Image (cartoon, rainbow, N blue to C red):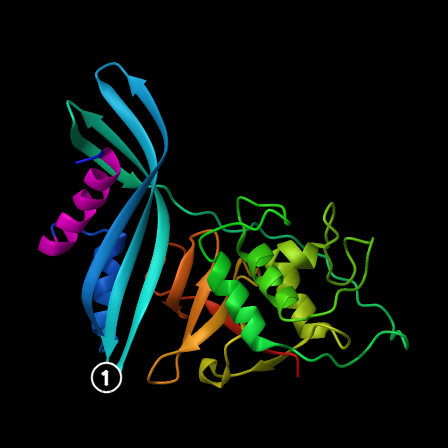
Amino acid sequence: MGKSEQLANYWLQKVDGKKDENWLVNRISTHEKDGAKVAQIRGEGTILSEEHDGEEDIITYRLCATFLVHKQHATYHEEEVHTHIARMRDGQIIHDERVEDGVQPHIQGLVVFESNDEDFDRQFSYDRRAAVQYAERWWNDYNSAYKKFEVDCTNYVSQCLRAGGAPMRGEPNRNSGWWFNGENWSYSFTVANALRWYLSGSTQGLRGKEVADARLLRPGDVICYDFEGDGNYNHNTIVVARNAQGEPLVNAHTANSRMRHWAYVDSPAYTENVVYKFFQIGL
């Protein structure tokens, strides 16, 4: 058995016996509370680096977990990737822990809305299918045409919106509009809090209509998260499907996720003060 397989099996054994609290067990528990059943879970490890410390090997790897979820008459695969660091001695794992995923810090004053530009189309045809196809293609990968960020959630969502035909404007002012040109980009393209405010205020090109209920969202729409409830939105996701109850399932980067329930209640960043913003795109 190779190291990658050994690392993945280490966590699957913990899930089978629910030996301790970890993100895989917590995800299963979250589905059970929601009336769903995780019928199967598979894990795949990808080694990123190896170091040696005396008699121990220190291995940094990505664990991709795939959950087969049943709820009522619907079945779908949910996937999520996290980075782990394991210590091994004599071929045995003696310690393994997940590396916490980052959230974006509070950044103020990043969005300026221009006066109406008569030459800029106020309407655009949003291709939701293309946006979702892009979200599915790149949920656990990175398009080399764009810069990759350590906290990449908003950059990923912006790429999906652009793939759906959202028009860009505001270049070269980084505080203005929503744009990317290969070498530079607006804050709203890459910063969670800035995209949230842009969607709330833009009246031309890319814009969003805020709604009160997540069940009003369709694939291609966007959810913004203020985990602490302090006014700073530090995560964004894109809706790619809905479950049997009409609840959105989302894709995201940073903690790369596919078909994850939109509420993120088992995320380490989640607090009881969380505030969500739900945006219908292209209306």
- Magenta-colored span: 3-18
Measured along the vertical axis of the image, is residue 135 above or below residue 254?
Answer: below
| Res 54 seen here | yes
Mark 1, other Cα within 10 Å: few <14 / some 14–19 / many ≥20? few
Q: Position of residue 120 (x, y in %)?
A: 85, 74
Q: Identify the residue at horizontal 30%, vertical 26% (top origin).
A: 58
Q: Position of residue 246 (x, y in %)?
A: 39, 84
Q: Position of residue 222 (x, y in %)?
A: 55, 71
Judge left or right: residue 184 versus residue 162: right
Judge left or right: residue 179 versus residue 33: right
Residue 5 within the segment the image draws in magenta: yes
In the rendered view of the protein, which quadrant contains the N terminus? top left
Measured along the vertical axis of the image, is residue 224 above or below residue 121?
Answer: above
Secondary structure mainly formed by the magenta segment = helix
Q: Position of residue 216 (x, y in %)?
A: 49, 85
Displayed quadrant of residue 162: bottom right
Amino acid type, residue under disc 1 in the picture? Gln
Q: Residue furthest left?
A: 17
Q: Residue furthest right?
A: 118
Q: Identify the residue at horizontal 70%, vertical 72% (top origin).
A: 206
In the rendered view of the protein, which quadrant contains the C terminus? bottom right
Identify residue for label 1: 72
| Res 223 seen here | no
Displayed quadrant of residue 61: top left
Q: Identify the residue at horizontal 78%, vertical 75% (top origin).
A: 204
